[in-house]
Structure formats: structure tokens, C-alpha cells
Amino acid sequence: MKSKKVLMSVILASLFFVCNKSGKANTLREKPKLLAENTASAQETVRNMLADSIDLSKLPFNEKELAAFPVFNPPADIVPLNKPLTRDFDRLFFPTREGMVPVEGKVYKAFLTSVTGKEWSLPYFEKSYKDLITAAGGMLIFQGRVPQKELDRIKDEATYFGEEGSIDYTNNLVKVYAIRRKEGDHIFVQISGYSAGGSIQILQLPKADKSSN
């Protein structure tokens, strides 16, 4: 009886050794594959993320031919109140569910109003830009107001507040649209209006540097 127990122990030990060895071999074979997959996944995530929390990965790529920057001219019967402000490179904050996020690129900002003789219509302003942006492949990624506490958090960085085309984030509804581009030159548009006029801010990222890939 004792010899049977010894034999059984030897057999179990052998099986454990074989299974453990096989498991290690499989793990070693799978490690390079998993590493490659994880690296590719991480790189894709980085490409789809802007700043801290604007995730474009769920947006389809837009390959339509777009007009030269600022891409979107004011709709019919709407004109800039003053001369629009355009910069080849600047930083704008865009509201997201996680808070205000800075994005850098080419910038266009303007206050808008109705042409002389026409009454201002906020629904017309919002719908007109929505139609223009969605026709160009854009999608709404945020809609809402921004708490004053969040604006206080970024006030030292957002030194442009008060310039042409500025938005009253706490009192007015803000809509943010994004257009995802394969070459990385994504476009962001935020619009906001009230009973007498509206504001628009457009930012386009520079194209990705292919030489660095």
C-alpha cells in the first residue's frame, strides 16, 4: 500500500512538472505577441487622445476635401461684428465632461451678429453651424455650461478670455464639435449664443509629422 502511495506521488509530481514547463513555454511564446499588441494599442490610443481627455477614437475619420482654414464661413445673413481674430498658433480651452482641456493649433475667433435689417435668431445660428459642421464630417462631442469653479482653475492659463470671440461659459450653453482627420489635423469648433448674437471659435491641429513615426 505504501509503495502505491509513493508511486502516485511520483506520477503527480511528474505531471505538475510537465504542465508547469508547458505553461512557461506558452507564456514565453506569447509574451512578444502580447507586447507587440499592447504597444500598437498604446500608440493608437495616443494618436486618438488630445491633451488630457478629448478622446476621438469613437469618431469616424473624415476624408472629405475641406475649405481652407477657418473651413467654415458664417452662414447666410450672419456676419462678424468686428474683425475676426486669426492666429497661426495659439492655445484654446475646450469644455469636456472631464473639464476644460487645452488644445493648440491654428485659431479663428469671432463675435457674430445678423446682417443689417435682419433680426437675430439663436436657433438659426445654432442649426446653420450644425448643418455646416456635420456635412463636413463633424460630430457634437459636448453640450452644456461650465462651472465657475472650473473657469477659476484655468484662469491663469486662459489669458485670452475677453478677446474677440470669447464665450460666456457660465451663463450660455456651449456646443463643441470635432472633425477627426487621418493626417492628425483634427478640427474643433465651439459655438455659443444668446439673445443678441453669438461666438465661434475654430481650432485646427497641425498635420502629424510622418518623419517622426
Image: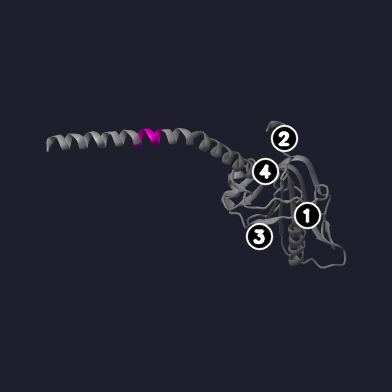
- Helix, strand or loop at disc 3? loop
Residue annotated with mark 3: 173
Q: Nearer the viewer, residue 68 or 57?
A: 57
Query: Looking at the rendering, in which quadrant would you find the C terminus?
Result: top right
Q: Nearer the viewer, mark 3 or mark 2?
A: 2
Query: Looking at the rendering, in which quadrant would you find the N terminus?
Result: top left
Amino acid on which disc 1 is placed: Phe
Amino acid on which disc 4 is placed: Val
Amino acid on which disc 2 is placed: Lys
Q: Which mark is first along the chain, 1 or 4? A: 4
Q: Cβ–Cβ below 8 Å for labels 3 and 1? A: no
Q: Which mark is first along the chain, 2 or 3? A: 3
Q: Nearer the viewer, mark 4 or mark 2?
A: 2
Instruction: Write the residue at 26% across / 34% down.
Output: 13
Within-10-Å neighbours for mark 2: few <14, some 14–19, many 20+: few
Residue annotated with mark 1: 111
What residue range appears in magenta? 19-24
Residue annotated with mark 4: 103
Residue 137 falls within the magenta-colored stretch:
no
The Cα–Cα distance between marks 4 and 1, rounded to whole angstroms, is: 21 Å
